[in-house]
Image (cartoon, helix red, strand yellow):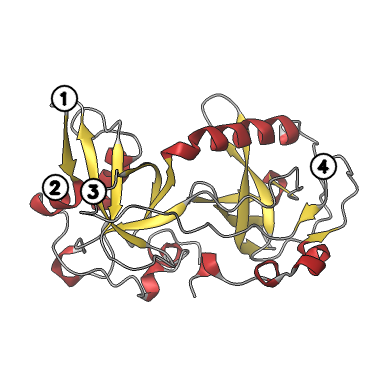
Amino acid sequence: MEEDEVESPAAETTAGEEEDYFTDAPDSAAGQIVKWWLPPSVPDLPDVGSGVAEAKVKVTFVDDAGQIYVHLSTERRKLADMDSFFHLKYGLEEAHRNDDVKWSVGAACMVKFADLCHDSWFRARILQLTEATKRAVVYRIDYGDFKEVPFCDLRQAYDYGYASVPAMAFRIVLDDVVPVAGAEMFNWPELELMYDQLHFKKFKGSAKHIKVWRTRGGVADGFPIPVKMEVLDSERDRFYDYGEYFKANSYATAGRVDTTAAKFRQSAHLEENYGYV
């Protein structure tokens, strides 16, 4: 079972055991403190060639295993509302601050990320802790990226009605697209290109629309999901098969993607290119 699908006590809780999902919290208006977040739900993506309309997605991150972290475009409003709400509730410097918290790996938390306008707060899970330097590596569950932050940028996660909302970022891979020359992982230049083109929308003008289909039949019951992806070239007003584009430009080669490989565990990229271990 993959890391972001590890069964926690929450996954095994029955209707009569909800009290195990939370710890007590002093702020009754905020609800209880969340111990862990729910993993992402497997989305109902259409099968390629089924004649069913594609699913449109927003790309938020790419890791060095070639996993693309996305959320459905239909959920963008929900995500924006969540972000605005957390900024309101956690934005004050001392809001929910508790320097006596004993953090643990796997725990739910809120983390402060700075953007161009202001500091924002997001749902996250702790991946690594370094007590000597009071720093942690956290995974933003609704975006798929991660960051090393000081403990002072962490807050306990209060329910506020969002404890029951599964993580919104889920992982896909381009089917039949593997690293060149038999490499296990993609190199940074290819990853940076993919991230720029898909997240920052720098594909042939502006990649305003990205749509995906599942490429393998049966019931999708885990991550990453192999997909076919098409990206809009706004200059020519046509869609390109992004996997074929990536291979045609020698950024990757053809080959079956083994989605059960160890490299597709959610935090596999931490040890490879980012030096947090």
Q: Are marks 2 and 3 in contact (CB under 8 Å)?
A: no
Tell me the crowding category of disc 2: few under 14, some 14 to 19, or many 20 or more residues within 10 angstroms, Cα based.
Answer: some
Q: In which quarter of the image is residue 55?
A: top left
- Of labels 3 and 4, earlier in sequence is 4
Residue 93 drawn at (x, y percent)? 76, 33
Label 2: element kind? helix
Q: Is residue 67 visible?
A: no
The alpha-carbon separation of the residues under discs 4 and 1 comes to 48 Å
**Secondary structure state at the residue bearing disc 4:** loop
Looking at the rendered structure, the kind of residue marked 4 is: Ala
Which badge, 4 or 1, comes first in the chain's sequence?
A: 4
Which class describes the residues within 10 Å of circle 1: few (<14), some (14-19), or many (20+)?
Answer: few
Q: Which mark is residue 265?
A: none
- In percent of the image, x 32 and y 52: which residue is there? 46
Question: What residue did someone put label 4 on?
Answer: 30
Q: Nearer the viewer, mark 3 or mark 4?
A: 3
Left or right of 244: which side holds 140?
right
Residue at label 3?
51
User: Which residue does the image show at 70% across and 65% down from the upper left?
Assistant: 104
Mark 4–mark 2 Cα distance, whole angstroms, equals 48 Å
Q: Distance between the residues labelled 3 and 4?
A: 45 Å
Q: Against 27, is 215 above or below? A: below
Marks 1 and 2 sit apart, C-alpha to C-alpha, by: 16 Å
The image shows residue 218, relative to residue 119, as above or below, that is: below
Write down the residue under mark 1.
Answer: 235
**To which residue does mark 2 refer?**
245
Q: What residue type is labelled 2?
A: Tyr
Q: Earlier in the sequence, mark 3 or mark 1?
A: 3
